[in-house]
Image: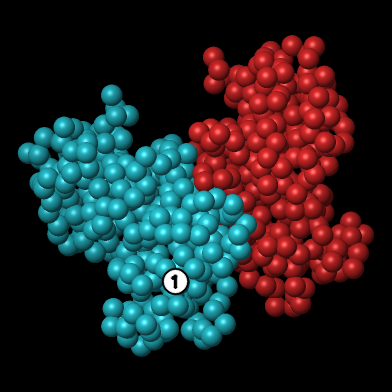
Chain colours: A cyan, B red
Amino acid sequence: MLIGAVEAGGTKFVCGVGNEKGEVLDRISFPTEQPEKTLAQVVEYFKDKQTQAIGVGSFGPIDIDRSSPRYGYVTTTPKPGWANYPVLSTLKSALGVPMGWDTDVNAAALGEATWGAAAGLDSCLYYTFGTGVGVGVFAEGHMVHGLVHPEGGHVLTRRHPDDTYAGKCPYHGDCLEGMAAGPAIEARWGVKGSELGPDHPAWEMEAFYIGQALASAILLLSPKKIILGGGVMHQAQLFPLIREQVRRNLKGYVASPAIESAGIDGYIVPPGLGDNAGLCGSLALGLRAYRDAL
Amino acid sequence: MLIGAVEAGGTKFVCGVGNEKGEVLDRISFPTEQPEKTLAQVVEYFKDKQTQAIGVGSFGPIDIDRSSPRYGYVTTTPKPGWANYPVLSTLKSALGVPMGWDTDVNAAALGEATWGAAAGLDSCLYYTFGTGVGVGVFAEGHMVHGLVHPEGGHVLTRRHPDDTYAGKCPYHGDCLEGMAAGPAIEARWGVKGSELGPDHPAWEMEAFYIGQALASAILLLSPKKIILGGGVMHQAQLFPLIREQVRRNLKGYVASPAIESAGIDGYIVPPGLGDNAGLCGSLALGLRAYRDAL
């Protein structure tokens, strides 16, 4: 069985074809331009691929409320041409197969729960730390939607006592994204994070913010696995620092072997699907759409 | 159809019989003593009631992982006699009907989503502010369990700039419960909250902490309704103050009519089931157990 996957990003689109084992058999990527042009490229790619369903994990904000007249739209993005654009119906009418639709991070969480670091678990959180901070929520076997969709990158955190940086978020200033996304690291230290050595104090400060947000998320949601992806997390030295901060904040309150002592090394982890996490997430969305249509 | 409900609290047990409309037809309450004695009272109450299923919403921490050998236990409570006690199996073997089992706050969330303020919605959060702070999470039509169960009363919040109180939580000091539960109000101001007038600055400070926690929960989970119960919330003047703080923290980021302008008055609300929220929650658990057993 062939399933299509679209990782619809604000900078580039990745399209691929895979199977029910999560194997990616073919892929292509192109820059995100005006929606008419970019979506035509998606249609062109899939038109002779004989996929049985296609999943789209999209940049946002998007409308994922099935009862909404704007279900399947990208909504209030500042990206030229894309605000209030009916992405899903444009693709669906051209391709004529069942389609899955969700946020890129919810898709990534589903992919990880299907074939990756959370395989077989009925809950996980997927965070991406890059130019922004996004969070996908998978709970009780379902991607969480709700009123709009999770925007957990903007939760409020306490300031690090030595941090004088005002914060980069245009809405909240010093929310998690404002303090811990890539642009905040660069603004705070004057160089890109990728140019800072692994022992630079930037990483302890970064872990301070991330660990705090994860601790509160663990308390509120009790996820069975937390997966941290995105460019910032290529700094592998962050993982032990973040686990330490999570423990420091929880103070033994959550009594679970998954979090206590060495268990936490297998609890807060990088994506099991590596750089395929995004595309495999969309593949998992497509697979779910195929099964839902049976 | 008759369904039984047990609101298993650390101070008192409430047992009742109701129907599928959420109507409570009979109720009784007695103090929580040693588990053998208290659970025998529960069994005695139900033995001739001819209920088709019984739901138990319990104080915690409890084990709600169906694959765990301790499923149905109260686990690490300091309450004498109750630590590691098999509450569910004790009741089930005596009563022989399908039984539902969850935290008191998850049950209350389910009850509100079935017959109360969130009736017909597939997601809501239920907070109780009393001697502690508890949170029930209902998302995509399911009560959220996960690794253990939600303990969102202990999320970390930023301090109010005028607040010098150290915090009451034995684990975290100044987490949400440490700053905003009833005992924290009493310790901070020297008198019980119920003795403070509605214009006392205590309430603005209380709303500061609650509003902050709700804003982060909205960002992470996007619930369709937030219900605030418990003794502290009998101070009705808190509701507008909390809504204002939520808006102040979100800063327009979550674009939904439910939160914008006057919509928020119907979004952050008291329990629709009033003082029956707990018992009706257990009733809803029982109803679900009945349907699952069909």
Kindly indicate the quadrant of the structure image that contains residue A187. bottom left
Between A91 and B89, the one nearer to me in the picture: B89
- Residue that appears at 23% across and 54% down: A276
Say few, some or many: other residues with alpha carbon within 10 Å of mark 1 (under 14 / 14 to 19 / 20 or more).
some
Is B15 placed above or below A185 here? above
Query: Can you identify the residue that label 1 sits on?
Result: A241
- Residue that appears at 77% across and 73% down: B165
Residue B19 in the image: state x and y as whole percent: 71, 19
| Camera sees residue A144 | no
Q: Amino acid at mark 1?
A: Leu
- Residue that appears at 61% across and 63% down: A251
Determine whether, in the image, residue A206 is placed left or right of residue A78.
right
Is A282 placed above or below B8 here? below
- Judging from the image, mark 1 belongs to the subunit labelled A
Is A220 placed above or below A54 here? below
- Residue that appears at 42% across and 59% down: A265
Determine whether, in the image, residue B14 is placed left or right of residue A224.
right
Is A262 placed above or below A169 here? above
Kindly indicate the quadrant of the structure image that contains residue B111. top right
